[in-house]
Structures are given as C-alpha cells and as structure tokens.
Image (cartoon, grey):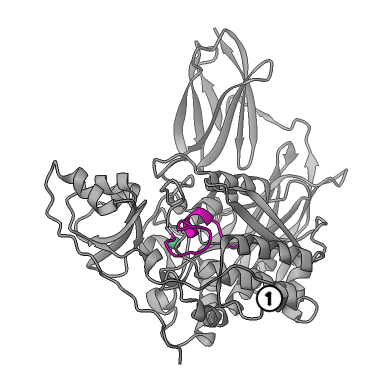
C-alpha cells in the first residue's frame, strides 16, 4: 500500500467574483502578483467555449459544474469581461515539493523514481548515446525561448543507416507542469536500450523501426522555477503561451490562439516537415484517458475504427497491470477528443491532418506532478501499453513506390478512395519511396497511388488483418511533365489573367485541398507565399501582388496529391 507523503492543498484561495468595471486591472494585478500564469475554475453554464478557448487554456471539463483552466495575465483580463463566476486555485506546479536528483548515472539506475534537475536531464540523455552507441542517437532539434534544449533520442538497431522502417514518435510534457510522462519516457528509453538483444519484443521493435522519444517538449515550463527543481512548473512556455494550442489547425487556421508560433512550435514544425512519422503520441497528465482525433471538430477520423481498436488495446492493457479505478473514466479509458472538449491548435490534430501521422493525446495520471515515489508504479501500469502502441506502426499496409523503368523511389500519395478524408491518407518517404499505413482489419477497395508526373495506379482490393503487415509495392509509369498546367477543365484556374496584380485562384475540386501557393518572379524571387485550404466545390482565394511590377510571374500550387504551375501576366 502506497502512502502519499504529501498533502494536497487544493482549493486554497477563493476569490469572490462580483466584477466591477474599472477595477478589473487592479483585480488582475492582485491575482497575478509576479506570477506568469494562474490556475482557476469557472462555472460551466451558457458559455461560448469557442471564444473562451482563444483567451484562456481550458485544462479539463470533468464535471458538469466546473471547468478548470489556466490563463496568463492578458487572457485573464479578457476572461473577466465575460463576467463568469470563477475561483482561483492553487497552481498544480506548487502542490508538492518533488525530490530532485542533480546527477544520474544511468548504468546504476534501475528505479526511475526521481525527477532530474535540468542539467542532470541533459547529461543523462547523452549518457544513453554514450552507453549504447549502436542503438541510440541523441540530438537537439533546437532551443526553447529561454535557450533550453529540445532533446530527442532516436532508437533503432543500425541507427545511422536509413532503412525501410517506420518511424514512431513519443513526446511528453508540452504542458510543463504535467511531468508524469517526462520521467516515464526517460524510463522507456532506458528500458528499450537495456533490453535489446535479450527481450524478444524489444529486439523486434528496434530491429524493425526507428523510435524517436522527446521526454520534455516544454523545458522552460517544467523548469519555470529554476533548473534545480520542477517545483513551480508552469503549463505555458516562457512567453505565457500554451504550446498545445499554438499549432496550425485544420479548421481554425494558422494561428488559432492568436499568438505567433513559439520557438518550441517552430522547431517541432520543421521536424515534422522533414521526417515522416507513421504514428505518435504526446503525453499529458491531469486526466487518465486515451484521447484520439479529432479535437477541433465533430466529424470522425476516417480510421475511427482503428483509433478505437488501438485505444481499447491501450486501456485494456493498463487495466490489466494497473490498480482498480485507474484509467477508467470516459468510455472506460478512451474518448474521442471533440466529445470530451474541443480544442484548436493542438498538436494531435496538426500531425494527423497536415502530416498524416497518427498521433494521439495520452493523459496518463490525474495528478499533474506525481510524487516521485509513484513514478515506478505508473511505469508498471503503462509500459506494456507504451510498447504495444509502438508495435502497431508495424501493421497495416506497407510497400515501396518506384519508377517503373529506373526503379527510383518516388514521392507518392496513397489514397483509399471512398475512405480517406481530412489528411488520413499517407505519403511515401521522399528519399526512399517507403510508405506505412496503419489500418483496421478489412477489405479495402481502390487504393490509388499517385506521384507528380506519373500515371496514377489503383489497386482494386487489399486485405488487411490486425497484427499483420500486408505488402503492396507499386511501380508508376512516368508520363513526361512533372507538373500539371492550369488549363480549362483543371481543378484550379486563374481569373483574370492577364491582370493588374489582383486576381483569384479559383478551385473546383470534389474534395478539399490543402495547398501551398507560391508565386515567383522570373528571376526566382518569391513574391507571394501562402498555405490555404480550399473547400470542396467552387471557392477561391483572392491574391493581391502588392506593388508588383509589370511582367510575367510563375504560380506554383502544391496540394497533397498534385502540383500545378501557370504563368501570370501582370500589366
Ligand atoms: Zn496537457
């Protein structure tokens, strides 16, 4: 029987909520004092969440009466204008004083029942690489706002070779005060590395895939109280921004939270743009649930059956190894994100929609900062699920798309007609032509492989079984031009052309199209660049080439499936 060594002070300060104009500023000042963010709850009634979610960060809606949220000073000032009853709560980052370790030797570490200081974390990550040079590569993808490292461990046998392997991604703690997953990910790295060659399952995973693990996605938040402790951890980054509301959103545009992209967001977006991840998860705490896409809208993911299947597998396994009552909320441990509460700008939807990566949001403990003595228990509850979920990236349909004559790998899209929607299709890895498509078991009709400049090929039937991999290699025939010209009958057209610098890009497609639109001058200088989602049916994007001088410009449109180009004459 575990004894909690810490008392949880929950509702400490109650601030009454009659609001008077003119006093708002001082009220906010008083509440914030020198704090960068506050934790509070407010009454859940007749509230427009669409608007609220842009000014404060809703943490959970677990009961009917109260909604729990975080806010920075600006957001809270705006919140006060809504005249909703609220109560300030003790910040979750200050509920306990965690025991920290300032040095960790991973060779002597069997129990991961501590939190490392920031320096100890950096040091122990590089120890993984030093101790397992054949299996592990550790690197930073860039720095946080305050200059802390965004570290990844890439784990695979022959990690320096590019192989025909799916890539899998775990990241944790993009909310800096949700630290359970932080240590569990360090534990997972250690477990994968130290069991390679002796444990059959681990050996199989590392031999056949690349596993990327980023234990701490928001180091400035986690160490907001200083590098020596996670006491005082904040949800937001150093600029007071919720990183899990800061990504481009399928429904709400490039900046759904109204903030510029943060350094942590930009570094991650660049990674997602350069590496194809097949599956992934981002770990949180504050709830216990497998929260699968979508978060932003009510429509279901094309692979909703697959999501429920892997989610059930996760939760059922956790129930087997965890104590009664753990991970049993919602639909016994799983929920559709939107059904719980809608968010915009989350990374899960960003990765699924724009990068075709099956990323899930995993809430693994109701307590945001677990006492260190409980970390080993939560490891026992969860590690089988960590491994099972990784293994799912090895199942479904896989293959290579190549040029029929040269055998060169192709950048291709693999689209299941009548099934895929909202970015659920997958693409090949551009350099190697490999693709991996997790799918629920069943017979899939009409899978179309297309690449720019090649004749598309459709496979009529492919049978998929759970826990099996179906091989489907495809060769495409080169048809000459790599690019479709915009001509009559095409799904895009320019009107008018020639023009005086303002015109419309018209779209007439049968499905929506995520498009990257670039316009170049003839000397190659970019004069216009925008990502835009055309909806299905007839719609258009107005373009104003501000101050463009007379002449010929080249328009390029890249959608998920095709490329187009056309000359534009500005008079
Ligand atoms: Zn979170």
Residue 66 figure quarter: bottom left
Query: Disc 1 designates what residue?
Result: 191
Q: Does the magenta portion include 217? A: yes
Q: Residue at x 67, y 15 (%)?
A: 522
Image position, residue 142 (x, y; %):
62, 47
- The image quadrant where one finds the C terminus is top right
Q: Residue at x 11, y 47 (%)?
A: 20
Image position, residue 158 (x, y; %):
82, 63
Q: Is residue 329 left or right of residue 269?
A: left
Image position, residue 209 (x, y; %):
74, 65
- The image quadrant where one finds the N terminus is bottom left
Q: Residue at x 62, y 73 (%)?
A: 187
Main SS of the magenta part reads loop
Q: Which residues are magenta?
A: 212-233
Vertical order, 363 against 53 (above or below): below
> Which quadrant contains ligand 1?
bottom left
Image position, residue 174 (x, y; %):
50, 57
> How many numbered marks does the figure carry?
1
Residue 406 figure quarter: top right
Q: Is residue 16 visible?
A: yes
Q: Nearer the viewer, residue 505 or 491?
A: 505
Label 1 residue SS: helix
Q: Nearer the viewer, residue 254 or 217?
A: 217
Q: Nearer the viewer, residue 104 or 403?
A: 104
Q: Is residue 505 left or right of residue 340?
A: right
Q: Is residue 268 left or right of residue 106?
A: left
Residue 411 figure quarter: top right
């Amino acid at each position: 029987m575990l004894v909690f060594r810490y008392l949880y002070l929950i509702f400490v300060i109650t601030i009454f909520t009659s609001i008077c104009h003119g006093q708002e500023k001082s009220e906010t000042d008083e509440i914030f004092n020198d704090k960068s963010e506050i934790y509070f709850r407010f009454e859940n009634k007749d509230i427009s969440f669409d608007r609220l979610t842009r000014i404060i960060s809703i943490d959970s809606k677990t009961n009917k009466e109260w909604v729990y949220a975080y806010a920075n000073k600006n957001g809270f000032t705006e919140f006060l204008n809504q005249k909703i009853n609220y109560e300030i709560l003790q910040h979750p980052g200050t509920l306990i004083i965690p025991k920290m370790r300032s040095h960790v030797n991973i060779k002597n570490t069997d129990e991961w029942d501590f939190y490392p200081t920031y320096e100890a974390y950096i040091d122990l990550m590089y120890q993984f690489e030093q101790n397992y040079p054949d299996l592990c590569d550790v690197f930073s993808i860039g720095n946080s706002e305050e200059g802390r490292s965004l570290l990844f461990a890439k784990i695979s046998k022959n990690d320096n070779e590019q192989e025909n392997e799916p890539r899998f991604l775990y990241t944790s703690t993009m909310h800096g005060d949700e630290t359970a997953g932080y240590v569990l990910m360090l534990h997972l790295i250690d477990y994968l590395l130290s069991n390679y060659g002796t444990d059959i399952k681990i050996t199989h995973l590392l031999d056949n895939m690349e596993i990327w693990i980023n234990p701490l996605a928001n180091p400035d938040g986690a160490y907001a109280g200083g590098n020596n402790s996670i006491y005082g951890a904040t949800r937001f980054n150093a600029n007071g921004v919720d990183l899990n509301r800061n990504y481009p959103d399928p429904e709400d545009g490039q900046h759904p939270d109204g903030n510029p992209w943060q350094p942590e967001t930009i570094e991650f977006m660049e990674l997602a743009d350069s590496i194809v991840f097949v599956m992934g998860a981002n770990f949180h705490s504050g709830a216990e649930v497998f929260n699968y896409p979508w978060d932003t809208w009510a429509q279901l993911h094309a692979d909703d059956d697959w999501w429920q299947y892997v989610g059930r597998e996760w939760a059922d396994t956790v129930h087997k190894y965890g104590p009664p009552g753990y991970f049993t909320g919602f639909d016994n441990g799983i929920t559709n994100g939107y059904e719980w509460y809608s968010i915009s700008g989350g990374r899960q939807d960003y990765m699924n929609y724009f990068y075709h990566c099956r990323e899930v949001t995993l809430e693994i403990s109701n307590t945001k900062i677990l006492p260190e003595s409980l970390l080993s228990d939560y490891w026992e509850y969860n590690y089988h699920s960590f491994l099972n979920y990784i293994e799912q990236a090895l199942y479904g349909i896989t293959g290579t798309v190549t040029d029929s004559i040269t055998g060169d790998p192709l950048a291709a899209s693999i689209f299941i007609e009548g099934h895929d929607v909202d970015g659920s299709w997958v693409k090949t890895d551009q350099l190697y032509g490999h693709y991996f498509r997790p799918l629920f078991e069943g017979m899939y009709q009409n899978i179309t492989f297309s690449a720019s400049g090649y004749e598309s090929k459709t496979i009529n039937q492919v049978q998929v079984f759970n826990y099996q991999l179906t091989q489907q290699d495809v060769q495409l025939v080169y048809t000459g031009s790599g690019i479709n010209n915009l001509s009559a009958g095409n799904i895009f057209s320019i009107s008018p052309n020639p023009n005086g610098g303002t015109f419309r890009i018209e779209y007439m497609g049968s499905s929506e199209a995520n498009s990257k639109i670039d316009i170049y001058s003839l000397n190659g200088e970019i004069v216009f660049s925008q990502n835009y989602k055309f909806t299905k049916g007839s719609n258009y994007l107005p373009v104003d080439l501000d101050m463009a001088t007379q002449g010929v410009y080249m328009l390029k449109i890249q959608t998920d499936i095709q490329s187009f180009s056309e000359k534009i004459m500005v008079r």
